[in-house]
Image: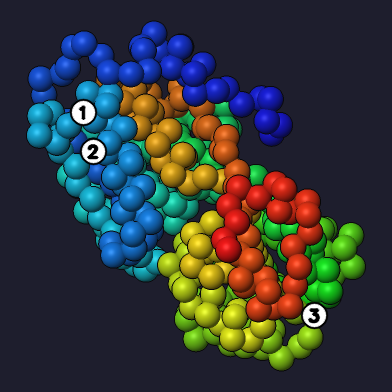
Amino acid sequence: MKRREFITLAGALATTGLPPRAHAQQTARLRRVAVLLAFDEDDPRPKNWLSVFTRELSGLGWATSRNLQMDVRWAGDNVNRMHVYAKELVDLQPDVILAFGTPVTAALKQETRTIPIVFVIVSDPVGEGFVESLSHPGGNITGFHNSEASIGGKWLGLLKQVAPKVSRAAMIFNPDTAPGHGKYYMADFKSSALSLNVEAIESPVQSVAELEKVIVDLGRTPGSSFVAMADFFLFINRELEIALAAQHKVPAIYPWRDVVAAGGLLSYGPDLEDIVRRAAPYVDLILRGSRPADLPVQVPTKFEVAVNLKTLKALGLEAPAAILATADQIIE
């Protein structure tokens, strides 16, 4: 579906007849919001996202000290735990559930077809069967789309600009947690590889040991690189990826700018904090009576490029002027 076919959040708010900020009248009844995250509880980045969401919701008139109860569960990358927590939260019968990620949204969908669900950081909501279409979700689920499949090709294109001698690239993913079990970005990645004369390698991993083996093996072959798929398993294990890429001199690109700040080479992806922030008005609308079926899935509005110059130098690379001119964040 083309970008022009999406209905904007402002339009969605207008159709409800409700202003986007706090209302003068508040419902006396205590409302319940459940939150399920495919992250570890001690990870500072998703903890900050949750704080951003809570703060935005408070600005819309919902506060835990007054009229709101929040039940939060952290599932990490453990798929079994996701299903356990999904059932646990559904049994609480909340008014709405906020789902962080594709695998937890899938787990929640298995448990309920009636409780409203708002997802964030989901790449392929139509392909995963969460919604009928982006403009008309049609069921009890709506939310915020993470990225289009074409970004799979953009990742490799940017990596090739920064590391022009790259001749082979592995796209790493965990089929248990990746969008479309790893297929969502793969076609565009392979198409880009063909046009760039780069050997494309599918590299599924389902454990830390397998992840380590893939990167170590890449380091043994000159011209190798990797693309980290937008996958919760890889996000959780990002520090290991950074360390292994540095140790074995493997250029890599990631979907998250945090990785570059921590020592990764290059990143390109949506501003995830902005996506989470934009979810608060949708939760507010549902708490006030709107149906998820009537709220179109939203697309990212902010994308970021980040590059780490220290890592670049350690790999013997030089950033093209075009990359430096367009980068949103340059780590010295």
Q: Which residue carries the number 2 mark?
A: 33
Dot 3, how many residues are within 10 Å of its Cα: few (below 14), some (14-19), or many (20+)?
A: some
User: What's the mark number on residue 223?
Assistant: 3
- Are the residues tagged 2 and 1 within 8 Å (C-beta)? yes
Judge by depth and name the residue closer to the eye, 78 or 110. Answer: 78
Q: Amino acid at mark 2?
A: Val
Q: Name the N-terminal-most of marks 2 and 1.
A: 2
Colour mapping: rainbow
Q: Nearer the viewer, mark 2 or mark 3?
A: 3
Q: Residue at x 33, y 18 (%)?
A: 21
Residue 74, position as x, y percentages in the image: 29, 59
Q: Amino acid at mark 3?
A: Gly
Residue 116, position as x, y percentages in the image: 34, 34
Q: Is residue 302 left or right of residue 82?
A: right
Residue 248, position as x, y percentages in the image: 63, 86
| One can see residue 8 in this view | yes
Give the CA distance from mark 2 to mark 3. Answer: 49 Å
Dot 1, how many residues are within 10 Å of its Cα: few (below 14), some (14-19), or many (20+)?
A: many
